[in-house]
Image (cartoon, rainbow, N blue to C red):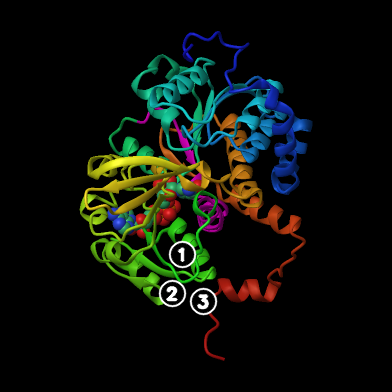
Amino acid sequence: MTYEQEPLMEGFKVKNQNMAPQGRLQIEWASNHMPVLAQIKTKFIEEKPLKGLTLAACLHVTKETGFLVETLLAGGANVALCGSNPLSTQDDVAAALAQVGAKVFAWRVQTTEEYYWCVERALDYNPTITLDDGADLVSTIHDKRQELLQGVKGGTEETTTGVLRLRAMEQDGALRYPIIAVNDAYTKYLFDNRYGTGQSTLDGVLRATNVLFAGKNFVVCGYGWCGRGISMRAQGMGANVIVTEVNPMRALEAAMNGYRVMPMSEAATVGDIFVTATGGTSVIRKEHMTRMKDGAILANSGHFNVEVNPKYLEELATSKRNVRPNLDEYTLKDGKRLYLLAEGRLVNLAAAEGHPSEVMDMSFANQALCVEHLAKEDRMAPKVYTVPKEIDEKVATLKLDAMGISIDHLTEEQQRYLTTWKMGTA
Ligand SMILES: NC(=O)c1ccc[n+]([C@@H]2O[C@H](COP(=O)([O-])OP(=O)(O)OC[C@H]3O[C@@H](n4cnc5c(N)ncnc54)[C@H](O)[C@@H]3O)[C@@H](O)[C@H]2O)c1
């Protein structure tokens, strides 16, 4: 029986409903480490700011997303949820969310066809607001489901790649409803992309391989917010980090942070472990793969599975076998073996559990407050907006409070000093 032939179970399709109790424990564990979102949930329970709204969310279905969905439900919304990657859904969490009334269409290990089937089922609920991680809801609505456009008030976008796609749509004049770029909040990308991706990417590589990092040549492709975090954490575990970049400022920053910087053609010959995090495509290509050492490990932490394109490995290899979960061995003509993790998909989500709850606390606090903002606003033009400064600052303040950290405040004299042009050399 295929997924299409199976009857839909009362508005959801998950792998196994019996996994709900385990998923509930996972969400509870995440929520214990998400104090900012917990405060927002309490406020949502009292005020019901999302009452009567239908939200469609295309997010990695993790335990942290579970707590976000529960927060949105607590605010009075109906929520339809699909996964934002064929390999990232935690099936127990999906089951637990279906049990509390979310319309969940997600399971781990999907074909591309199944993935988009789930996207379309979430959209069948006629959303007023969309929450995306990679812009697949927005692009599907604009390409195939234009009848939904008149009912959509706005949307949010979680990641760098999604924001890039949406800005391209805006520039082409194609974007038909407003989007808040949650990714661009300081309390999102400075923490989630850096510390979250840094820690969880290493976690993914370790769970898939269990290799020792100390002493290895660890190549990080792209020194953006994710790349900075991955490099920092790999160095912390004793790896010799090599950075490849196309942006001279970022390359310079990497060099001054103590990493070796070189083109991919050189890095290919010396690297033991390669991780891409560029948001671009075909970063590691055939000409690099053929120059790699026997046993080289390849992983990707960028949004789409095109940075280390598995197609190139398929074309070069004479044989392929699965060695461990999320670890495929490709043998090339000359007998050399290359190892690809999680089919080149986001290694931290496919081979581990994604970001730790503490960073998702801030990312998803931004999501919840931006959804509330969209619910209240009536006259936003179809553009990509940054997160309102008040929301970003509120999230930072709540997080500091939750961490038991207090900070100084400017005195009146200091405030005057900083705003006058009359005081100079004393
Ligand atoms: N794994 C996760 O959980 C996770 C979390 C956040 C973001 N992301 C994704 O990671 C990717 C990177 O995000 P970011 O916030 O770090 O973006 P960013 O824009 O800050 O950094 C990307 C960097 O890659 C560089 N780059 C581009 N093409 C390159 C190439 N061919 N070779 C070497 N360097 C190249 C750019 O110059 C830039 O410095 C995006 O796809 C984003 O959606 C993943």
Question: As drawn, is 367 to the left or to the right of 184?
Answer: right
| Residue 231 position within the rendered picture, expressed as x and y whole percent measured from the top left | 46, 64
Upstream in the sequence, badge 1 or badge 2?
1
| Residue 5 position within the rendered picture, expressed as x and y whole percent measured from the top left | 48, 8
Question: As drawn, is 86 to the left or to the right of 97?
Answer: left
For residue 342, say whether it is visible. Answer: no
> Dot 3 surroundings within 10 Å: few (below 14), some, or many (20 or more)?
few
The amino acid beneath tag 1 is Ser
Q: Is mark 1 within 8 Å of ligand 1?
A: no
Upstream in the sequence, badge 3 or badge 2?
2
Instruction: Inspect the magenta stretch and tell me whether residue 196 lies in it.
Output: yes
Circles 1, 2 touching at the beta carbon (< 8 Å): yes
Q: Mark 1 points at which residue?
A: 231
Q: Is mark 3 on a helix, strand or loop?
A: loop
Q: Name the residue under label 2.
A: 257
Residue in the foreground of this view, choosing between 135 and 204: 204
Residue in the foreground of this view, choosing between 92 and 64: 92
> In the displayed image of the protein, which residue is found farthest to the bottom?
426
